[in-house]
């Protein structure tokens, strides 16, 4: 797991480095956005200062995301108004926050990375397939089978009980929104009581009444943690 820290303040790079405590983490440090973009390593998580001389953090993030859509971007900034810029980021960390809160956000970014790299295995008739948790957008139930809809590989089928699936994937950020639908909160873009849930790919899914309150709570918790 490669974790990059990009900040023009060496003191802050050193501070962040000390807060990363994971046996599999390899830390890469950069004092400018241009040097980060020159890096040939595949970066899994980046703690990225927004305000830097030359190319700023927002521009760097756009370029990194084009290279690797699965990269987890954590912006660090001295100004909380940047948390409203609307960029798809995992977290916005204020430099003035106590170390305990910064470490919590880093630990949760690492947990997100690990969850996204968990693989689930599926079997249907004579076919077997697998998909990473981070690639699954939603599941659709149909009698004793369900369809697995993914970002990269289309869809596949699996024999199994939907209730068992719900219990299995809930810890990875999935929530049931209908008796026949479980979605990955990572890909939920809009929740509308009348229209339903819009997920990645501009797909709308129906919300069942008995699931609406839990969906609202889980969605607000998920999104709230990323501001």
Image (tube, rainbow, N blue to C red):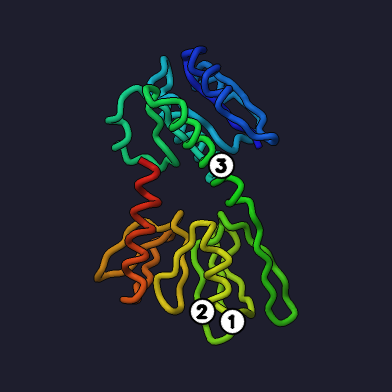
Q: Is residue 140 above or below residue 53?
A: below
Upstream in sequence: badge 3 or badge 1: 3
Residue that extends furthest to the right in the rendered view of this protein: 126
Q: Do the residues labelled 2 and 1 touch (CB within 8 Å)?
A: yes
When asked about the image quadrant of residue 113, the answer is top right
Upstream in sequence: badge 2 or badge 3: 3
- Tag 3 residue: 68
When asked about the image quadrant of residue 164, the answer is bottom right
Q: Is residue 74 above or below residue 53?
A: below
Nearer mark to the viewer, of 3 and 1: 1
Residue drawn at the location 49% of the way across and 66% of the way down: 138
- Tag 2 residue: 141
Q: How crowded is mark 2: few (under 14 residues within 10 Å), some or many (20 or more)?
A: many
Of 120 and 169, which appears nearest the observer?
A: 169
Of 174 and 57, which appears nearest the observer?
A: 174
Q: Residues within 10 Å of mark 1 (few under 14, many from 20)?
A: some
Left or right placement of residue 174 versus residue 161 in this view: left
Q: How crowded is mark 3: few (under 14 residues within 10 Å), some or many (20 or more)?
A: few
| Label 3 – label 1 distance at C-alpha | 32 Å
Whole-percent x, y for residue 216 in the image: 32, 61
Residue drawn at the location 51% of the way across and 62% of the way down: 170
Residue that extends furthest to the bottom in the rendered view of this protein: 143
Whole-percent x, y for residue 196 in the image: 31, 69
Dot 3 falls on a residue whose secondary structure is: loop
Residue drawn at the location 53% of the way across and 58% of the way down: 171
Which numbered disc covers residue 145?
1
Q: Do the residues labelled 3 and 1 touch (CB within 8 Å)?
A: no
């Amino acid at each position: 797991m490669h974790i990059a820290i990009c900040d023009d303040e060496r003191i802050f790079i050193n501070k962040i480095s000390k807060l990363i405590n994971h046996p599999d983490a390899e830390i890469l440090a950069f004092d400018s956005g241009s040097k980060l973009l020159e890096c040939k390593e595949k970066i899994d998580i980046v703690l990225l200062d927004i305000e830097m001389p030359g190319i700023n953090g927002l521009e760097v993030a756009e370029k990194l995301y084009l290279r690797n859509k699965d990269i987890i971007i954590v912006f660090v900034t001295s100004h909380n108004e940047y948390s409203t810029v609307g960029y798809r980021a995992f977290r916005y960390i204020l430099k003035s926050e106590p170390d305990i809160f910064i470490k919590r956000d880093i630990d949760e970014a690492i947990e997100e990375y690990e969850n996204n790299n968990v693989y689930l295995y599926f079997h249907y008739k004579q076919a077997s397939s697998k998909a990473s948790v981070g690639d699954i957008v939603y599941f659709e139930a149909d009698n004793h089978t369900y369809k697995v809809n993914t970002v990269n590989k289309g869809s596949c089928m699996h024999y199994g009980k939907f209730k068992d699936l719900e219990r299995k994937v809930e810890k990875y950020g999935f929530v049931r929104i209908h008796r026949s639908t479980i979605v990955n909160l990572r890909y939920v873009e809009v929740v509308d009581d009348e229209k339903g849930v819009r997920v990645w790919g501009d797909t709308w899914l129906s919300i069942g009444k008995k699931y609406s309150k839990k969906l609202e709570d889980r969605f607000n918790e998920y999104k709230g943690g990323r501001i």
